[in-house]
Amino acid sequence: MSKRIFRAGLAVALIALGVCAWRIFFPSAEQVIRKRLNEVARTASFSAKEAPLATALNSQKLANFFAPEVEIRVDVPGRWQHTFHGRDEIAQAAASARSLVGGLSVEFLDITVTIAPDRESAEASLTLKARIAGEKDLIVQELKFFLKRIDGTWLIIRVETVKTLS
Amino acid sequence: MATNTAASTPPSLLRRAVIGRDPRRTLARALVLVVSVMVVAKFVLLPIKVEGGSMLPTYQDHRVNLVNRLAYLFHEPRRGDVVAIRLAGPSIMYMKRIVGLPGETVAFHHGHAVINGKILEEPYVKFPCDWERAPVTLAPDQYFVVGDNRNMPIEDHTMGEPHRNRIVGKLLL
């Protein structure tokens, strides 16, 4: 009886291990997108100690998460309205933000990914939580990311701010 | 002749206090307690930490509170309720007071909330306010929410008309 229980337990453990290994080696599109968005947040974050060369490299690295013809629409009523077009503008904006503030920590929370039936495009909803070094208040904004698989890589083609309270 | 001393001597007082007379039963109780706390914290009373001063003086910055997710199981949100409003998910939520109900027209005039043309009595607003905001008519599933701290420029205060499905629950404390 105990041998049977042991075998059953071993089988369950092996199946669980197999599933974990499968997910690591063959991640789903949803997992890939989540991982990529978390990388975007990490790359957008910086500290005051960042060297000028690292600033340039990280700004370019951030821009590379986006498609060449990307569009980022920022519409926070009463505060800021602007549309960024293309990777170059994003790299420039990232570099100038790095020179303007002494540090920024960015996190993406509650990421929900919806893959389109064609498996080539996807939509991700999330909450941006950011804190500028030395500032007391948090920056909180709901965002929608639109992604497309281009040459096997999920690139961001559009970002929109969501008006939560309207 | 051998005797079983472990069986005959009673467990120490400390051991009995920590793991009880029957360790298996204690473990089972602890597991039930942990699972219950996890279920309650996720589906019934969501613990939150207040960040920012938009609900001052009613709710102080950095205080801990609980969101009752079952508060609107049997009735819809009411005027005066302080509610948690989700963004993309429940990790970060706005904490605001409901002043306008579905279908009503809400405006601000001389710092007073005006509902369907009548000034709303708001004893919880303690700080002076001079806000002016054009009337807005709420949809059948929209509420008008605003913070209690109106002693700031209206542009700096987050308020608005969330839909019912964004209201996660009512603040408990």
Image (cartoon, coloured by chain):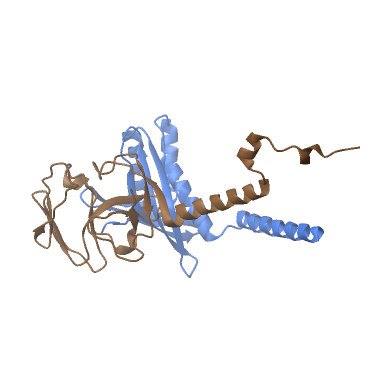
Chain colours: A blue, B brown
Give whichever of A139, B35 is nearer the camera. B35
Farthest right residue in view = B1
**Where does the image place residue A80, in percent across and percent down from the top left?**
24, 48
Measuring from the top left, give residue B120's x and y in whole percent: 13, 55
Say above or below: B96 vs B116: above
Q: Identify which residue, B143 or B170, lies in the foreground.
A: B170
Residue at coordinates 33% horizontally, 60% vertically from top-left?
Answer: B166
Q: Is residue B22 left or right of residue B78?
A: right
The answer to whether residue A152 is above or below residue B125 is: below
In the figure, is residue A107 to the left or right of A79? right
Q: Residue B19 occupies which quadrant of the picture?
A: top right
- Residue at coordinates 41% horizontally, 31% vertically from top-left? A52
Quadrant assignment for the N terminus of chain B: top right
Residue A87 seen anywhere in this rendered image of the structure: no
Query: For this view, does A45 lie left or right of residue B97?
Result: right
Foreground of the two, B106 or A133: B106
Q: Is residue A147 visible?
A: yes
**Total count of labels:** 0
Q: Is residue B9 above or below residue A115?
A: above
Q: Residue at x 44, y 42 (%)?
A: A43
In the rendered image, residue A154, in percent from the top left (x then y), is placed at: 48, 57
Q: Position of residue A19 (x, y in %)?
A: 65, 59
A107 w.r.t. B114: above or below: above
